[in-house]
């Protein structure tokens, strides 16, 4: 799932205090010769509010079962996101399908300036101060994946220094 990102650290759910946030539920209809068959799909974001987050999709005939399946799926896809004092290390754009998301670090006290699906993901990661803009499609499935695309591209200063083979000081001072 995360093959295209270079330094993604996947996390096992054991020992973590994970909280789940329901992003959206869709009622889907399948028309058969016997009439309409209704089902539900739920998308959930799971995180420990300290840099670890995952998202999951669950489908079922009942809402509660769909949500439970989504939470289980989310726990299988946990990743660690680099944070810097309650905000992001740098600004980043992410996209998935028709959804475009832009996230930018903000000074302390700003809060999470984000709407809907982006807010759910950022709060689950544990970001307290951030500015964001969601453009294009507002489909919650694609917005969540676009937000993950942006978050997975983030790199902290130590990672950049290691990749370039220079000291941490040289990264900042040039």
Image (spheres, grey):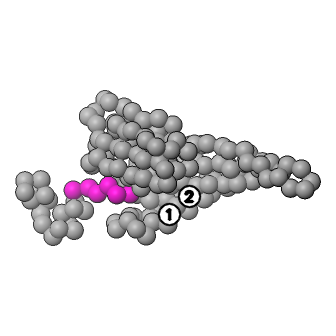
Q: Point out the stretch of residues depicted in magenta.
A: 152-157
Distance between mark 1 and mark 2 Cα atoms: 8 Å
Looking at the picture, does residue 77 appear above or below residue 65?
Answer: below
Q: Which residue is mark 1?
A: 12
Q: At x 49% / y 54%, what residue is drawn?
A: 97
- Give the crowd class for mark 1: few <14, some 14-19, many >=20 residues within 10 Å: few
The answer to whether the residues at label 1 and label 2 have Cβ atoms under 8 Å apart is: no
Instruction: Tell me residue 104's x, y (percent).
Output: 31, 42
Q: Is residue 15 magenta?
A: no
- Give the crowd class for mark 2: few <14, some 14-19, many >=20 residues within 10 Å: many
Q: At x 34% / y 36%, what residue is drawn?
A: 131
Counting residues from the start of the chain, the first of labels 1 and 2 encountered is 1
Instruction: Tell me residue 147's x, y (percent).
Output: 44, 49
Instruction: Label 1, secondary structure: give it.
Output: loop
Q: Which residue is mark 2?
A: 75
Q: Is residue 19 visible?
A: no
Q: At x 51% / y 37%, what residue is drawn?
A: 116
Foreground pick, 65 / 30: 30
């Amino acid at each position: 799932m995360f093959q295209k990102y270079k330094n993604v650290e996947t996390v096992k759910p054991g020992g973590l205090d994970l909280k789940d946030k329901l992003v959206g539920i869709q009622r889907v209809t399948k028309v058969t010769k016997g009439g309409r068959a209704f089902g539900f799909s739920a998308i959930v974001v799971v995180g420990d509010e300290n840099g670890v987050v995952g998202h999951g999709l669950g489908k079922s005939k009942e809402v509660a079962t769909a949500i439970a399946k989504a939470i289980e799926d989310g726990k299988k896809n946990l990743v660690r996101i680099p944070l810097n004092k309650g905000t992001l290390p740098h600004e980043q754009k992410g996209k998935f399908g028709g959804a475009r998301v832009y996230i930018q670090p903000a000074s302390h006290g700003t809060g999470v300036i984000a709407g809907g699906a982006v807010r759910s993901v950022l709060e689950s990661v544990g970001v307290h101060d951030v500015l964001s803009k969601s453009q294009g499609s507002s489909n919650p499935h694609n917005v969540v994946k676009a937000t993950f695309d942006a978050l997975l591209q983030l790199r902290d200063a130590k990672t950049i220094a290691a990749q370039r083979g220079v000291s941490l000081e040289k990264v900042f001072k040039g």
